Image (cartoon, rainbow, N blue to C red):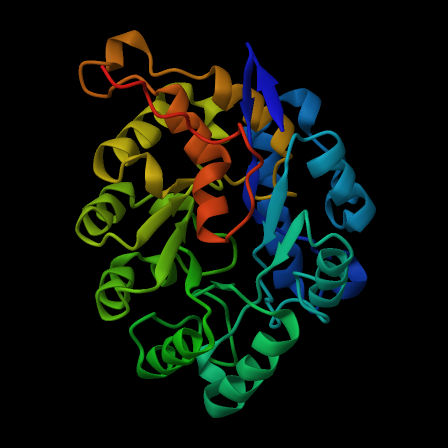
Amino acid sequence: MYSKDGENYFIVDAHIALWDARPENQLNIHGKQFIDCFYDYHRNLSPESEVWPYEEYLYQGGERLMKDLFADGYVDHAIFQPARLGAFYRSGFGQTEEAFALARKHPDKLTYNHSWDPRYEQKGLDQLRRDAERFRLKGVKLYTAEWKGDSRGYKLDDPWTYRYLEVCQELGINNVHVHKGPTIRPLDRDAFDVADVDKVATQFPEMNFVVEHCGLPRLEDFCWIATQEPNVHAGLAVAIPFIHTRPRYFAQIIGELLYWLDEDRIQFSSDYALWTPRWLIERFVDFQIPEDMTPEYAPITLAQKKKILGLNAAAMYDIEVPAGLGVTAPAAA
């Protein structure tokens, strides 16, 4: 929990990972390219005091994760959103077994989401059913630009993806997180285009589609989709660190999201270990739309900040919010 000026905030970090990008796990040059790109994002968008040494960034481990999120970072609950990247890493980038073991050890603090790839066709569908039972999945994370053989990505509206989504719905996995944001070297930019979100959101109206990174750099496209599809949500991973380096740019991002989606469909995410949550939470609670931008964007209210920082994700994942930490309705006139 974070407290400031007499207000308490229930924090859900809706997008975290436990990765291993050490040289011994890199399958080829692309594994190094990927983590180097991650590190450039981390180094260039973080305050100097928050920049990790490169060697520590390659692998953080569960003990450090628990300290950074829960001991130091104000987080009440966090959700793993793994990327496998089997074409780049021997045992995968996101560490399934280590992350799941940590979530089982701390079920009050961690939720484990898993991933799937429709290009595995029926074999993958069978695995999804086993994974859903083992991990008790409520959500999945999709990485549409991931490489597999000669394929350098897939789309959400591909026929096999539809079959996987149908099985997810059948199994009660109703929260689908999709990376639709900045390209990470060596992945292809077009494979993260947001257009296919529109089709699946219409096709599966009872499922939630959380567009991680809110479609950046395609924010306008994302907003036009989300305003007509009420089951499309915005994840602030990668967007929120601009609060430090480009505060007016962040003001534009959050201003557009609040205009088009409202505060009920926006989720805070540190994208740990890209960034640690402590400074992001502190900066967001203190943040306000610059005065000269308020003719276009309304000031951010306390209730909006509380929903974004945790209450929205808590509602989506049925995470219990302690009494007194929700949004208090204004008294009737």
Nearest to the observer: residue 280 or residue 147: 280
Residue 307 x %, y %: 42, 34
Residue extending furthest toward the bottom: 122
Vertically, is 277 above or below 118?
above
Nearest to the observer: residue 301 or residue 200: 301
Residue 265 x %, y %: 34, 43
Quadrant location of the C terminus?
Answer: top left
Vertically, is 183 above or below 29?
above
Q: Residue at x 24, y 44 (%)?
A: 223
Residue 76 x %, y %: 63, 38
Residue 226 x %, y %: 24, 49
What is the quadrant of residue 65 in the picture?
A: top right
Vertically, is 176 above or below 214?
below
Q: Residue at x 31, y 18 (%)?
A: 331
Quadrant location of the N terminus?
Answer: top right
Indicate left or right for 34 with 119 as reference. Answer: right
What is the quadrant of residue 253 in the picture?
A: top left
Q: Residue at x 43, y 75 (%)?
A: 168
Indicate left or right for 225 with 238 as reference. Answer: left
Vertically, is 272 above or below 121?
above
Indicate left or right for 194 with 228 as reference. Answer: right
